[in-house]
Amino acid sequence: MALLLVALFIVVPIAEIYVIIKVGELIGIWPTIFLLLADALIGSWLLRHQGRGAWRRFNEAIGQRRLPGKEVADGALIIVGGTLLVTPGFLSDIVGIVLLVPPTRALVRRVLGRFMVGRFAFVTVANSFPRGGTGGPGGPRSAGGANRPYDFDGTAEEMSPNGNGTDRELPRIEEE
């Protein structure tokens, strides 16, 4: 894990700077700056466009009452890809484009899916109250508005700092 962090925070920025310098030597400083700005603008547009599509697919999955695992993975990959495209650097732009283009994003999602299999457990908890039962979803609402088994009606009363309803001081216990 430490090696990964070293690579991420030290090696990758050095490589990005090296590539930017080499591209600048090859095509000049102003075309290099223009390319980096164009990458950022195109990246933000792609992020917005692909993000809207992922959000629409996510809502459709929820509307169909199915687990939106693919849609959530796509959304996360789109966010990472867009962030990499907006970040200055040509190497990060390549990875960002791979994550934003749908066919390559699907390949990355499959690879990540194979890597994640067996690393996470999904637990579902069944509702203990049947539909239409007392206090369950769809059941009658209580006077205060609670309608789920974990909703409770109650009142609160402010207490004095010493906790007994009066303002007199409690005796202090001294430590030895």
Image (tube, rainbow, N blue to C red):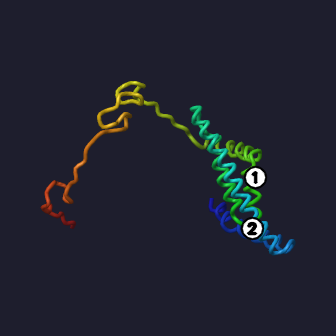
* Quadrant the C terminus occupies: bottom left
Mark 1 closeness class: few <14, some 14–19, many ≥20 residues within 10 Å: some
Quadrant in which residue 109 is drawn: top right
Mark 2: amino acid: Glu
Mark 2 → mark 1, Cα distance in angstroms: 17 Å
Quadrant in which residue 19 is drawn: bottom right
Mark 1 = which residue?
98
Q: Circle 1 — which element?
A: helix
x and y percentages locating residue 51 in the rendered image: 65, 49
Residue at 13% from the left image edge and 57% from the top image edge:
166
Mark 2 = which residue?
16
| Left or right side of 29 for 121 | left
Can residue 117 be seen in the rendering of this structure?
Answer: no
Q: Circle 2 — which element?
A: helix
Quadrant in which residue 26 is drawn: bottom right
Mark 1: amino acid: Val
| Total number of numbered discs in the rendering | 2
Residue at 22% from the left image edge and 53% from the top image edge:
158
Mark 2 closeness class: few <14, some 14–19, many ≥20 residues within 10 Å: some
Q: Nearer the viewer, residue 73 or 62?
A: 62
x and y percentages locating residue 49 in the rendered image: 69, 50
Where is 64 relative to 50, above or below?
Answer: above
Where is 99 relative to 121, above or below?
Answer: below
Residue at 55% from the left image edge and 38% from the top image edge:
122
Residue at 14% from the left image edge and 63% from the top image edge:
169
